[in-house]
Image (cartoon, rainbow, N blue to C red):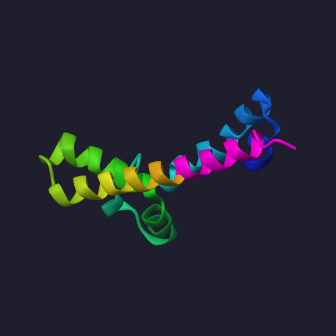
């Protein structure tokens, strides 16, 4: 659905993709610290890179700059930023390709 929304260029289709991304916030440590999660939810949160960004922000605001968590958050931001930049370049090339 996301690729269809972005590929179509339709604003309504792109806004509709938020229905996919909103539930993904529950698979992060955004509402509960990672240490308090258990089972499959903990595993899902550990696989989600946004968790590390949220844990870094929580460490800065609450626990007094836990450097390991802050560096994990920075690494996750750089990784996500690089991946999204690469996807944006590919998408731009596809959309502006001359035939």
Q: Nearer the viewer, residue 92 or 32?
A: 92
Residue sticking out furthest to the top: 11
- The magenta segment is 84-99
Q: Quadrant of residue 8?
A: top right
Question: Was residue 51 drawn as part of the magenta stretch in this picture?
Answer: no
Which residue is located at x 61 percent, y 45 percent?
88
| Relative side of 92 to 66, left or right | right
Which residue is located at x 76 percent, y 41 percent?
95
Residue 55 screen position, x and y as percent: 31, 52
| Relative side of 16 to 48, left or right | right
Residue 87 screen position, x and y as percent: 61, 51
Q: Nearer the viewer, residue 87 or 44?
A: 87
Q: Looking at the image, is 76 positioned above or below residue 7?
A: below
Residue 59 screen position, x and y as percent: 21, 49
Q: Which quarter shows the C terminus?
A: top right
Residue sticking out furthest to the left: 64
Question: Was residue 89 drawn as part of the magenta stretch in this picture?
Answer: yes
Residue sticking out furthest to the right: 99
Q: How many marks?
A: 0
Which residue is located at x 68 percent, y 41 percent?
92
| Relative side of 51 to 90, left or right | left
Q: Nearer the viewer, residue 28 or 96?
A: 96
Our reading of the magenta stretch's main secondary structure is helix
Residue 37 screen position, x and y as percent: 39, 62
Which residue is located at x 71 percent, y 40 percent?
17
Q: Quadrant of residue 35?
A: bottom left
């Amino acid at each position: 659905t996301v690729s269809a929304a972005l590929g179509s260029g339709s604003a309504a289709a792109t806004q509709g993709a938020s229905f996919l991304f909103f539930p993904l916030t529950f698979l992060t440590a955004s509402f509960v610290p990672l240490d308090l999660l258990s089972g499959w939810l903990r595993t899902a949160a550990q696989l989600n890179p946004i968790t590390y960004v949220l844990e870094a922000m929580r460490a800065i605001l609450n626990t007094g700059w836990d450097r390991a968590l802050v560096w994990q958050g920075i690494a996750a931001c750089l990784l996500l930023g690089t991946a999204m930049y690469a996807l944006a370049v590919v998408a731009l090339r596809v959309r502006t390709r001359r035939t």
